[in-house]
Amino acid sequence: QVQLVESGGGLVQAGGSLRLSCAASGRTSSSHVMGWFRQAPAKEREFVSCITWSGGTLYYADSVKGRFTLSRDNAKNTVYLQMNSLKPEDTAVYYCAQREIGVITTTPDLYDYWGQGNRVTVSS
């Protein structure tokens, strides 16, 4: 079993920055994918970014490309989502997720473990 604990959300003005963290613990495969998703009110959960743990391959949604940066610290089993130039449309609950199979995907249903969610609110 894998546990994912997120931190770092909050309220920020448009144009500001926030950094989300996701710490993983428990049994995990040696090659897995860590992803971030978000869900705004009355909307479906959408893909934000993901990274392979071993190869460092990154993938971003077009809506955040150039503004968000995903990184990882393997020694701490933690991934970070640095969010810059935030917009009101970035307001959502952000979730980190882990997929045991080391193949990148943007489909939420293919991820095996989820964090508790962290609210990010961007005011205009």
Image (spheres, rainbow, N blue to C red):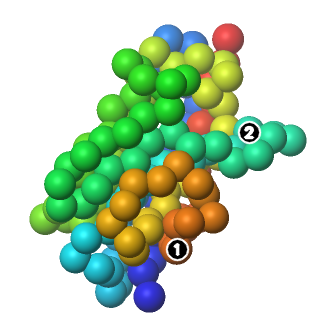
SS type, badge 1: loop
Residue 90 sits above or below residue 38 on the image: above
Residue 110 to residue 43: above or below: below
Q: Mark 2 — residue? A: 40
Q: Secondary structure at mark 2?
A: loop
Residue at horizontal 67 percent and vertical 22 percent from the top: 89
Quarter the C terminus occupies: top right
Q: Is residue 16 left or right of residue 82?
A: right
Badge 1 density bin: few <14, some 14–19, many ≥20, Cα 10 Å: few
Number of dots carrying numbers: 2
Residue 73 occupies which quadrant of the picture? bottom left
Residue type indicated by callout 1 = Asp
Q: Is residue 82 left or right of residue 43?
A: left
Q: Residue furthest left?
A: 75
Residue for point 55% across, 23% down:
63
Amino acid type of the residue that numbered disc 2 sits on in the rendered structure? Ala
Look at mark 1 in the image and give the residue it sits on: 112
Q: Is residue 75 visible?
A: yes
50 and 80: which one is in front? Answer: 50
Residue at (44, 66) in percent of width and height:
98
Q: Earlier in the sequence, mark 2 or mark 1?
A: 2
Q: Position of residue 3 (x, y in %)?
A: 44, 77
Q: Tell me the quarter of the picture where residue 43 sits.
A: top right
Q: Position of residue 4 (x, y in %)?
A: 45, 69
Contact? badges 2 and 1 (CB < 8 Å): no
Residue nearest the observer in this picture, 53 or 18: 53
Closest to the observer, 22 or 51: 51
Asked if 9 appears above or below 31 in the picture, the reply is above
Residue 106 image offset from top left, x and y in percent: 53, 49
The reply to whether residue 7 is in sight is no
Query: What is the C-alpha distance between the residues marked 2 and 1?
Result: 21 Å
